[in-house]
Image: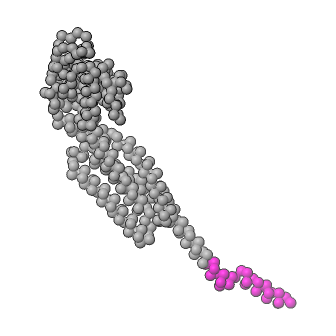
Amino acid sequence: LWTKRCHNGLKLFVHVCIPPRERISQAMKLSEETTSLLKRDLRQAIGPIEVLGAAVLSTVAFGVAFACHACGIRDDSPGLATIGGLGLLAAAVLTTALGVVRWRQKKSSRALLVTAIALWGGVLIGNAVGNTWYYKGVAKYAGLKKMASYVNIDPSADNAQAFQDAGILYFKDGTKVMRSKALAFRNGLTYCVAPIVLEPLEGESQKAAKKTNEGFNIPSVGSLDYWAVGTDCCGNMGTPFNCHDAGSLRARSGLRVLEDNHRAMYRLAVQEWSATTGIPAKHPLFFEYVKDPLQVEDDLKTLAGDRLPAHLMVYFLAALFISYILHMVLRHWKVF
């Protein structure tokens, strides 16, 4: 009896503790499926390094493109700027090609594709933003440097036709901006104009040629052609006029406005002002009225470079967010 019980117990132990081949095979199969699922999940997972790397590379591309298009290197070393731009394009094209090839081969390609998109974004946005700042800063600086400077100008007696090539004018002592006679012209922006005068426009004036029907003094030169201007720096009717340094008693210099689109708007504003007062403006010249035009010129040269750090910070944060979104989208489309 004891022997029979031992035999039965041994059979039970073997049956319970040592599974048959079918159970082992099934367990191995389940283990392989689990491993496969884990590997797939790992491939689908969004790695922070991949997201951060794409954002950093995109920001670098943006910074290089911005510098090549906005800063002094564009004029001082155009060959170097071109090489920088071509290098960025080559990097974007190569990354795109590698990503597409790996995607077609069903290999891991999501990081490369996101990086390629990020590089293209950095290059294109850097070019566009940089080009905008170039015309606001370096291009304006270069244009002013090619123009002449004149001193001791009397806006009431000197004919403006003689200074059509002027970049900077230094007016006579006593010259001021008639801020109380400013006018505003709206066309998207508010274009503000105010006459630059030495002799009074109202009241008695020994040098005045004659008076208009509205009672204003016409300058001895016969035309009022020197104007202090600015955008969005005056009230709806023109006053108060707070453009540049027009309110400073130390200011008596004008930095020429070169933007054609702005000059067209200022010309319309002056025509309206002339029609209201009766004073002709035959050859109007438009200036930013400032204390130190040379310092303003230097600021224009470094304007884009001064703005670059702030642009890089904002762009990096945006690139980081967009990089994460791109990873999420490609993951949804089963791109690993």
Is residue 14 depicted above or below 298 in this figure?
A: below
The answer to whether residue 41 is magenta is no
Is residue 266 depicted above or below 177 in this figure?
A: below
What color scheme is it? one colour
Residue 276, x across and y down, in percent: 28, 21
- Say whether residue 191 is left or right of residue 108: left
Q: Is residue 149 visible?
A: no
Residue 95, x across and y down, in percent: 36, 62
- The residue at 25%/27% (across/down) is 271
- Say whether residue 139 is left or right of residue 61: left
Residue sitting farthest toward the left: 162
Residue 178, x across and y down, in percent: 28, 19
Is residue 234 depicted above or below 307 in this figure?
A: above
Residue sitting farthest toward the front: 213
Is residue 28 depicted above or below 248 in this figure?
A: below
Q: Who is closer to the viewer here, 174 or 314? A: 174
Q: Is residue 143 visible?
A: yes
Residue 284, x across and y down, in percent: 21, 27
- Say whether residue 205 is left or right of residue 63: left
Quadrant of the frame with the N terminus = bottom right
Task: Name which quarter of the figure residue 192 lies in.
Answer: top left
- The residue at 47%/61% (across/down) is 330
Query: Which residues fall within the magenta stretch?
Result: 1-28
The answer to whether residue 5 is magenta is yes
Q: Which secondary structure type mostly characterizes the magenta part of the structure?
A: helix
Q: Who is closer to the viewer here, 212 or 254? A: 212
- The residue at 66%/81% (across/down) is 23
- The residue at 32%/48% (across/down) is 128
Task: Name which quarter of the figure residue 222 lies in.
Answer: top left
